[in-house]
Amino acid sequence: MGFRDKLTKYYQDSYLKKYGDRLTQVRGNVLSVKVEEKRILWIFYKLKAVLIVKPERSRNIVSCVYSRNKWFKKPKFMAISQGNLVIVQGLKPKKNNSKKHKDSKESITIMNILNLTTKGELYHVDGNVMKNATKVKYKYK
């Protein structure tokens, strides 16, 4: 095991230790997409995208938020339209015991999106993740 492998393993372990209980993913159809772009003084760009996803075999609706800030360059976001089948990978909100936070709407913070309809992804993932994601079959008992 080389130096790079040890360093990569260290970062993976520390990330899972910090966020492991909050990691989640949602697979379903997109009901709504709203993308807002703001530019401040021609040098600072803000991007905020809100997705409403209806998971397969569920009546629930999940709100997903993607936000990025960049200096000098416009942040990129993938093309998603209503009705696309997506897998959203992200973090659940932190659990707080105060009543003030229970009333607020919970949403998933997006880390990556796999669009199974157009075979696109927000951040490229090594391996054959797209092949495995499209081959998922459900077994009924």
Image (cartoon, rainbow, N blue to C red):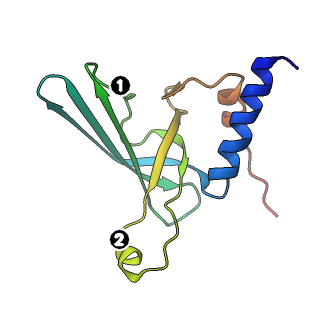
97 lies above or below 43: below
**Residue in view at x 70 percent, y 50 percent:** 17
User: Left of 40 or right of it: where is 16?
Assistant: right
- Name the residue at 75% across, 19% down: 4
Counting other residues with Cα less than 10 Å from the Cα at mark 2, is it few (<14), some (14-19), or many (20 or more)? few
SS of the residue under disc 2: loop
Image-based side of 34 in relation to 13, left or right = left
Q: Where does the image place residue 91, in percent across and percent down from the top left?
A: 54, 52
The residue pinned by badge 2 equals 104
Tell which of 36 and 84 is nearer to you. 36
How far from the left and from the top, in percent, is residue 63?
41, 56
- The dot on residue 124 is none
**Disc 1 on helix, strand or loop?**
loop
Residue 71: percent from the left, percent from the top?
A: 28, 24
Front residue (pair 73, 125): 73
Residue 86 in sight: yes
Q: Amino acid at mark 2?
A: Ser
